[in-house]
């Protein structure tokens, strides 16, 4: 199909009068289109929505944010930190709308494209009380067994033990400060747990930084001073920026694996309800059991077998950057991400087609209703929210 024909279909869809024949033509084109062709067309589609007045904004601060977003993508692409497939054009209104429309991009499936039921989200049944996104929320258990709610604790010093001062900052981080002349007990272990709907950051005594995703548990010594190894344990998901120390390897133990590093940036996804543990390396080098990873690679541990693949870095660390990126994973895996962040339970209608491939991006700061509405636009599923229960139907 020629571009001119595609653009005509887009115009009709933006105006709300697409014919069945045009939908069939578009879906036939979608099956053979490359990612680049699809993304180019979606840029034009959202520009049409803007022109049609569906998304209106004259807020210069919004477009400054868009500019910053484009700059960020371009910088990371040039540096090789992220390999972006999208062809954004600087200062383009279309690219701007493609990047940031009310804080969210489009959702689509390979089966329906964006031409599902355009009015589906208008019928979305939500509870009266809007479910808000997660935030900085965690519990800290000290070596003496004392449990502290970091959500409720005042900013500043919250505890001292084994020659270490533990303090909380206003931006959702706990910091460990070691006193050189104090006695250090290497057996003193602290544990920080994030509930569903929570996240937190930890600055360890060696200077390493750890970001914890929702429903995660992280245990570590209050001091590494006299330890040969910097040994920590994780269940759930965390992003690490490990301080370099060639004499003291940093080892992360999770279900079925050990990750050994000297100083590097990496992400571990090790939830008990997922079928595999995934370790993604951004820079430096790590050893996952017997497998060595290079930057841009991901190890996948399933059972006792471990395989190494090229990583989609952007998707792997999207949560840490405040985003959901739904790409390359099955529908239920994506729904589990939503369930953990919004602290909801997901139930599925019997016989529901699970082979749905979502595509798109949405901010984790969005309300649950906004996220589900955008998924509904793909036309493959319908959601009903009752309290903290989300029912997924055909």
Image: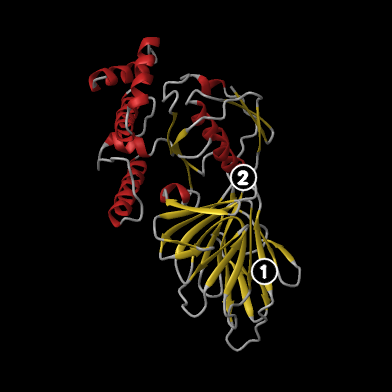
Indicate the position of residue 10 as horizontal and vertical percent values.
Answer: 32, 20
Splitting the image into 4 quarters, where does residue 31 fall? top left
Indicate the position of residue 157 as horizontal and vertical percent values.
Answer: 63, 71
Q: Residue furthest right?
A: 145
Indicate the position of residue 141 as horizontal and vertical percent values.
Answer: 71, 65
Q: Residues within 10 Å of mark 2 (few under 14, many from 20)?
A: many
Q: CA distance from mark 1 to mark 2?
A: 23 Å
Indicate the position of residue 83 as horizontal and vertical percent values.
Answer: 34, 49
- For mark 2, what is the residue? 340
Q: Look at the numbered disc 1 and give the secondary structure of its residue.
A: strand
Quadrant where the C terminus lies? top right
- Residue 208 appears in the figure: yes
Q: Earlier in the sequence, mark 1 or mark 2?
A: 1
Splitting the image into 4 quarters, where does residue 238 fall? bottom right
* Residue nearest the observer in this picture, 165 or 35: 35
Quadrant where the N terminus lies? top left
- For mark 1, what is the residue? 190
Q: Is residue 133 above or below residue 237?
A: above
Q: Are marks 1 and 2 in contact (CB under 8 Å)?
A: no
């Amino acid at each position: 199909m020629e571009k001119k024909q595609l653009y005509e279909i887009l115009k009709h869809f933006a105006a709300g009068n697409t014919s069945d024949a045009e939908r069939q033509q578009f879906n036939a084109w979608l099956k053979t289109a490359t990612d680049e062709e699809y993304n180019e067309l979606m840029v034009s589609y959202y520009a049409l929505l803007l022109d049609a007045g569906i998304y209106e904004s004259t807020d210069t601060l919004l477009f400054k944010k868009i500019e910053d977003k484009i700059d960020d993508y371009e910088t990371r692409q040039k540096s090789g930190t992220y390999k972006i497939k999208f062809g954004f054009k600087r200062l383009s209104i279309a690219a701007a709308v493609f990047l940031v429309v009310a804080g969210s991009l489009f959702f689509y499936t390979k089966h329906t494209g964006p031409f599902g039921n355009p009015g589906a989200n208008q019928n979305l049944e939500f509870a009266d009380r809007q479910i808000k996104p997660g935030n900085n929320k965690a519990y800290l258990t000290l070596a003496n067994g004392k449990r502290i709610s970091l959500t409720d604790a005042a900013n500043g010093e919250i505890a001292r033990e084994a020659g270490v001062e533990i303090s909380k900052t206003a931006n959702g981080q706990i910091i460990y400060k070691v006193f050189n002349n104090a006695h250090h007990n290497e057996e003193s272990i602290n544990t920080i747990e994030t509930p569903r709907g929570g996240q937190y950051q930890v600055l360890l005594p060696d200077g390493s930084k750890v970001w914890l995703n929702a429903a995660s548990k992280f245990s570590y010594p209050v001091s590494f001073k006299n330890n040969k190894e910097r040994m920590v344990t994780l269940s759930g998901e965390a992003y690490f920026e490990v301080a370099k120390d060639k004499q003291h390897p940093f080892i992360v133990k999770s279900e079925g694996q050990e990750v050994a590093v000297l100083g590097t940036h990496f992400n571990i996804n090790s939830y008990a309800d997922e079928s595999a543990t995934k370790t993604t390396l951004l820079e430096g080098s790590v050893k996952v059991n017997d497998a060595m990873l290079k930057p841009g690679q991901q190890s996948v541990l399933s059972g006792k077998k471990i395989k190494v693949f090229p990583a989609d870095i952007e998707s792997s660390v999207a949560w840490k950057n405040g985003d959901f990126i739904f790409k390359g994973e099955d529908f239920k895996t994506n729904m589990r991400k939503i369930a953990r962040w919004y602290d909801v339970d997901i139930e599925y209608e019997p016989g529901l087609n699970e082979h749905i491939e979502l595509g798109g991006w949405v901010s984790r700061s969005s309300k649950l209703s906004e996220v589900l509405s955008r998924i509904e636009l793909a036309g493959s599923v319908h959601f009903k929210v009752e309290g903290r229960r989300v029912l997924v139907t055909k």
